[in-house]
Image: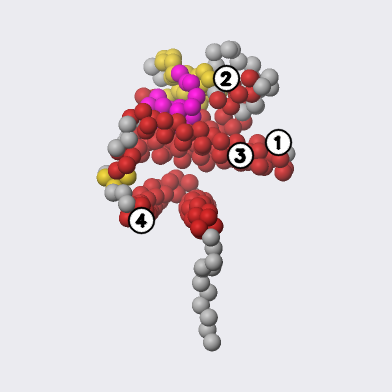
Amino acid sequence: MEKKVMWDENLSNEQLAKLSMEMFHRIVIHHALWFNEVQHQLGFPEALKILDAAYQKSFNIQMKRFGKFFGFEMENGVPKPFLAMPREKLLALLNDTAVNWLANDGVWFQAVEFKHGMNDAKRCNDSCWGKFSPFEADSIKRFLGLEEKPGLEGLKKALQFRMYARINVQSIIDESPNSIVFQMNDCRVQSARKRQGLDDYPCKSAGLVEYATFARTIDSRIKTECIGCPPDAHPEEWFCAWRFILVEEA
């Protein structure tokens, strides 16, 4: 006689609650794996386009279902309880989300480092930035509604919407009509190391990938130069500095 395989009805409420959280995690990983495979098969630029369409549709489907379950409505693509929050709470939410993002990045780095060593952790980290940075730039570009080639003004605006911008102190100097200088004046990671009496973390290899791909995604005409980034020596007023140059097309 055929017997249907069902959920274990003997799970406790705590186990069911934990399982629901674990299933949310599966959704996130499945989402990321889909993107990874599409970029492998069709290329990164095309994957970003497909991601935008898939994310918007998936988000609407899931939030509609969760809204019905938890008892909240959506308005203009946002849960109404969020819209009802005071501005200070929303800003605090952005900050906490950015800190969680940075903590997650650090956890992944250490997970690889403790098992395979610093060299492999740095290799994975640098490669990850090569994908995350252009994705973040593309996401910000869409959020702000920037044109295809918004120039240095577009880049200046986009740099203010990075995850890092919520938790670090940064500044932008208009150097010339065709160049700007970006400075990371206070870096949460480096400042923490400094308080512990540790040397700067040598992040230049990641920064070379991170900043160049971000700027190029905002506007393909923008070239990036490193002024200084650990392990380079740097002045007290910044940890790293980058020059972005708009090269006009012939």
- Residue 221 drawn at (x, y percent): 42, 30
Q: Are marks 3 and 2 in contact (CB under 8 Å)?
A: no
The residue at 55%/25% (across/down) is: 188
Disc 2 target residue: 239
Disc 3 target residue: 107
Quarter of the figure with the N terminus: bottom right
The residue closer to the viewer here, 125 or 7, is 7
C-alpha gap between disc 3 and disc 2: 22 Å
Residue lying farthest bottom?
1
Q: Is residue 122 left or right of residue 149?
A: right
The residue closer to the viewer here, 175 or 96, is 96
C-alpha gap between disc 1 and disc 4: 45 Å
The residue at 55%/16% (across/down) is: 238
Q: Are marks 1 and 4 in contact (CB under 8 Å)?
A: no
- Residue 5 drawn at (x, y percent): 53, 74
Disc 1 target residue: 118
Q: Which mark is residue 24?
A: none
The answer to whether residue 50 of the structure is visible from this angle is: yes
Q: Which mark is residue 69?
A: 4
Label 1: how many Cα within 10 Å (few below 14, some 14–19, many 20+): some
Q: Which residues are magenta?
A: 155-171
**SS type, badge 3:** helix
